[in-house]
Amino acid sequence: MQTQLECLPCFLSQAIRTLRMSGLDNDTVENAIQGVQGTLLAVSREDSPIEVAERIQQIIREVTGCDDLYAEIKMRSNMGVELLLPELASGLEKGHDPFEYMLRCSLAGNLIDYGVYAEVDPVSVMNRVVSAPFVGGHSLEDLRRRMSGARSLAFLTDNAGEIVFDRFWLEWIQRTYSFDRILIAVRDRPFLNDATLEDARHAGLDRVENVELVAFWPEERMKGRQHHAVWQRLSSMDLVIAKGQANFEALSNEPGVFFHFVVKCGQVVSCLGDKTGHDVELGSFVCWRNPGDRAGAPVQI
């Protein structure tokens, strides 16, 4: 997915929110924003949104001298979601389709996104578990069928907090389908409130049966040998699921990948509508597989 002009105000707003939470004085914040504005003036239509956001976050890291401004927020998010799990578990006993219900739990967790929202309301997240509509042309039944036949799974995570919902879902998947191998990919460096290896371990993802954690940055899968090797491992799994809007922006052209996220952006509404041929609303749940045969698909280098 390419960066659009409409993305630029969002980048600027995201940068201001992050700088304000750092506690810097107004003069320092204004100087940093000038650097961000210079970066935005140099944006190319060929740049993906996550590439641009990473350049901006690098400016903020240099100004603040802090590598992970969201570390405390991420830990609080993981701990807060743990408190919601008993209520979510009780939902399995209320006559819902277990497969769809557990997927909805994982999808609702995608609302824990401090790159988009200044605050996240846990009650709102809980309500979305059963109430949010799916985007038309969804791949839920396709996913259910492929889940039954797959022996290995690649799972690309998104945000802290959300990964506790994901652990809840993956534990149910293992009880139901017993995958031989699950590769769980997290960010290989701090980026907003996206999950890193430390966050994933704190959330207990490493305790899911037959799981291996790997560090990965999707935009670099075509650049360095190390990142290429990780993507080669991920894309060789029987089933590939990418959580979050940023992974959709980075990987939406990869055939066979299932994308799971909550629609939070007008540009994604347009892009996804073009790809699915259906109307898309903000706040909808996405369970969509990029069409095409993954078998024999070349790994981009």
Image: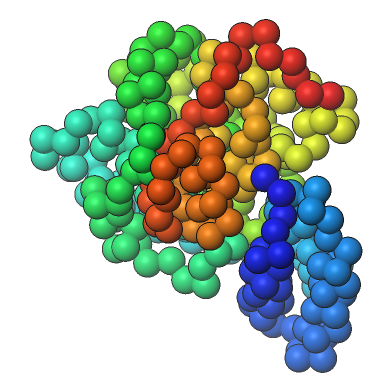
Tell me: residue 63, above or below residue 76.
below
Left or right: where does residue 98 sit relative to residue 175? left
- Please provide percent x and percent y for residue 140: 35, 29
- Give the quadrant of the N terminus: top right
Say how many tags the image has: 0
- Please provide percent x and percent y for residue 67: 77, 60
Is residue 184 something that shows in the picture?
A: yes
Q: Quadrant of residue 138?
A: top left
- Residue at x-position 87% and y-position 33%: 223
- Please provide percent x and percent y for residue 167: 43, 36
- Residue at x-position 58% and y-position 14%: 293
Tell me: residue 138, above or below residue 122.
above
- Please provide percent x and percent y for residue 146: 41, 15
* Most foreground residue, 6 or 12: 6
- Give the quadrant of the C terminus: top right
Left or right: where does residue 205 sit relative to residue 187? left
Left or right: where does residue 141 sit relative to residue 258? left
